[in-house]
Amino acid sequence: MRRIDVTGTGGVRLAAWEFADPPKGCGEGEHAPGVLLLHGLMGRASHWASTARWLTERHRAVALDQRGHGRSDKPAEGPYTREAYVADVEAAVEQLGLAPVTLIGHAMGALTAWQLAAKRPDLVQALIICDMRASALGAATQREWENWFRSWPVPFATLADVRKWFGEDDPWVERPNPARGEFFAEVMAERADGWRPVFSRRQMLTSRETWVHDAHWEELAQVRCPTLVVRGLDGELGRAEAQEMVRVLPRGQYGEVADAGHLVHYDCPSGWRTAIEPFLEGVLTP
């Protein structure tokens, strides 16, 4: 795994992570099909590690820490607009030489992916949307997130406390989920007073504010490349809406993972691979 810095819109420094050398059989002058992995809100590139391990058998897999996340810059005043996120990914695809790329996005990262696919069809070969709704989420959800952020008992004394709170004790979650605890442990850093998130919760709310009030069906319908819409059976994207998204997409396909919630690729890596690998083989065979 090696870090490659790219320059996003407005000069923001973005950390991209390439997970392996090019696959066997791709010599000098040859290029494996490019895949760019985009995490969701509060995520980071390392959350894609298990997916990237098997992707690198045949593809060039790169994950991006988006602005405000992971090891990328977190400008105090942003911008954290949809336009900025999309322009960052556009710049990353071009600077990394990944085009025509397959974009795999989770939640907010999936929205960024399909907005780029609609804007720059010349750059995007295929698209996987993981548990992201096209309908508006509404202002009430933004208030819920504000209250949820306030409930975090930061700083956490240990990483074990992080895992326990997010995996077992978080009052905003219906049932325990150890994978969720591990997910949040990856986005914590040790400070003098304990463990705190590597992102600003204020910036996360600002990022979310720019897309929760609007529906995104029009941009989805503009995506012309093969697209797989995947949901966790207990995720945030309902089956009816996911199937409507597939209907709206000119070349849409549907998939679901039975033993997963919103964090589909993290909750059930084997089921996630089973759901997406046939699609990738169909569009990315070298």
Image (spheres, rainbow, N blue to C red):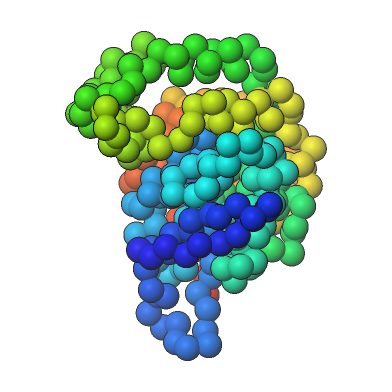
Q: Position of residue 181 (x, y in %)?
A: 30, 29
Give the x, y percent position of residue 51. 39, 53
Q: Is residue 70 left or right of residue 76?
A: left
Pick the quarter of the image with the N terminus. Answer: bottom left
Q: Is residue 177 above or below residue 186?
A: above
Q: How many marks?
A: 0
In this picture, residue 149 sits left or right of residue 237 = left
* Residue 78 found in image quarter: top right
- The residue lying at 76 percent from left, 41 percent from top is 219
Q: Is residue 127 visible?
A: no
Left or right of residue 53: residue 85: right
Q: Specify the quadrant of the image occupied by residue 221.
A: top right
* Residue at image coords 28%, 20%: 165
Residue found at the far front of this picture? 192
Q: Residue at x 53, y 70 (%)?
A: 33
Please report the residue visible at 35 percent of the width from the left and 45 percent of the height from the top.
269
Question: Measured from the top left, where is residue 18 in percent x and y?
Answer: 43, 64
